[in-house]
Image: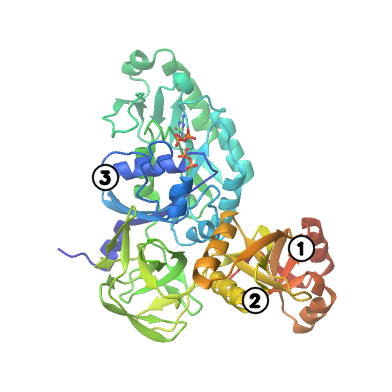
Amino acid sequence: MSMSVPEQVSKRRTFAIISHPDAGKTTITEKVLLFGQALQKAGTVKGKKSGQHAKSDWMEMEKDRGISITTSVMQFPYADALVNLLDTPGHEDFSEDTYRTLTAVDSCLMVIDSAKGVEERTIKLMEVTRLRDTPIVTFMNKLDRDIRDPIELMDEVEDVLKISCSPITWPIGCGKEFKGVYHILRDETVLYQTGMGHTIQDSVVIKGLDNPELDEAIGSYAEDLRDELELVVGACPEFDHDAFLKGEMTPVYFGTALGNFGVDHILDGIVEWAPVPQPRETEERNVEPNEEKFSGFVFKIQANMDPKHRDRVAFMRICSGEYKQGMKMRHVRLGKDINVSDALTFMAGDRERAETAYPGDIIGLHNHGTIKIGDTFTQGEMMRFTGVPNFAPELFRRIRLRDPLKQKQLLKGLVQLSEEGAVQVFRPLDTNDLIVGAVGVLQFEVVVGRLKTEYNVEAIYESVSVATARWVYADDERELEDFRRKCSANLALDGGDNLTYIAPTMVNLSLSMERYPDIKFAKTREH
Ligand code: G4P
């Protein structure tokens, strides 16, 4: 009955969704889960209107806001595969966790609002996926509305995101006139039916482009489709699986998440083409998923997932071997073996005890402060996974105490919260300020809340004139020392005492980069 590790690996597809807020990520997640039958009926994941709360929502704060702070993990079967979908915090809850989640997946689904095209958040997230050349599947959403010209949309993806597009489906009409899509590889037309968004539809499929049934079904759109396709197929590159795996080409699908139309096409594409769990690098060697011995790394730490327990859970991506309940793991950084009897698996927010888990899966370890972002766990081997960096924050505030006597606790709290990845902290070399840096604005709120409940300090924020931060290095120690002396006013130490350039403006940063060509200004920093 039980499958070997290689068999388990071959079934897994682990991906995340990248999109700009409101492009339809939540709606797609909901429909994807419907296909995975994890939810009986795709209700609302966020429940903004219905008052129902999504299974992927955990924290009180999320309920108040109707948004999802946590990067929840959803596992479900689809076709012959077992799919892990890692949710990426998106609206105001956008944070460094969103970026780090992208380091723990093997592929991404990019969702674009077809009326708007490539938006700012998508550009940022794509930049992160480029660090690992993660394969990208693209979904052009909201075809039930009036959209931009599909060819223009694909051109924009190519120009802005520098990835070539190969359409797998092609839309027929849009808005009120949306008729369906033609699946180029299957040579069949799938007709769109309105009002079926909450169900898995028995889709009407017409085989062959020249089939007269097509003319009967969609009238003059059939002829237009034939003409258009001649052009599209001539102008667009054919889908090339290797180029996809290298992150150079994206298969493009069209549909409407709200109408649950086209979502199954993407899932079919992911199951067929997206990579199985990939080898991962450590400082010492490459780790293959099929290796017998267990290994994994922590990419996220979630505090207080369950308000009743006030616990912290470390999310670990398994990289090789098999996790078995009760097994012993080596916490490499501490050089200590720990017994793991109660790791969690995730079925759309239900926290269940995992008995076994395999490469590509995410498990949650209870954490009482000993686990940090980037930590490696093995069955004894002393190695360290790389590729789970800190990302340069984009928002900064000075943090100050209401009660100045608690400075020590404040610093301790901030350093611990930064180790956990909740926020980053910078201490300027020349002043006694404490500057907090975040990627998303909600991180600030979370930090003040946690400082109060966990460290008993009341802190407030003030604005500070910092536009961006870069970790600085030099091959030559003397160069760095010289730089440190001359630029001390713009230098700070982060939570791990790493030297950081905090630039008051982007212009200031470019000038300094020009002036000090031997200094490296890095946007990411490995733990
Ligand atoms: P996000 O998670 O990426 O932020 O997007 P979300 O799925 O919440 O979608 C944003 C809005 O766009 C929602 O409407 C949603 O219903 C709508 N939407 C998603 N997919 C489609 C689609 O294919 N067609 C159309 N017409 N709309 C779509 P809302 O009114 O802002 O939210 P809600 O109050 O309905 O939750």
Q: Is residue 308 left or right of residue 233?
A: left
Q: Earlier in the sequence, mark 1 or mark 2?
A: 2
Marks 2 and 3 in Cβ contact (< 8 Å): no
Q: Quadrant of residue 369?
A: bottom left
The residue type indicated by label 2 comes to: Gln
Frontmost of labels 1 and 2 is: 2
Label 1 sits on a secondary structure element that is strand
The residue type indicated by label 3 comes to: Gln
Q: Is residue 219 left or right of residue 82?
A: right
Is residue 238 visible in the rendered image? The answer is: no
Q: Is residue 348 above or below residue 40?
A: below
Q: Is residue 129 above or below residue 253?
A: below
| Residue holding disc 2 | 407
Q: Residues within 10 Å of mark 3 (few under 14, many from 20)?
A: some
Q: Earlier in the sequence, mark 1 or mark 3?
A: 3
Q: Which mark is residue 129?
A: none
> Quadrant of the image for the N terminus?
bottom left
Q: Which mark is residue 503?
A: 1
Q: Earlier in the sequence, mark 2 or mark 3?
A: 3
299, 513: nearer the viewer = 299
Q: Is residue 477 above or below residue 170?
A: below
Q: Which mark is residue 37?
A: 3
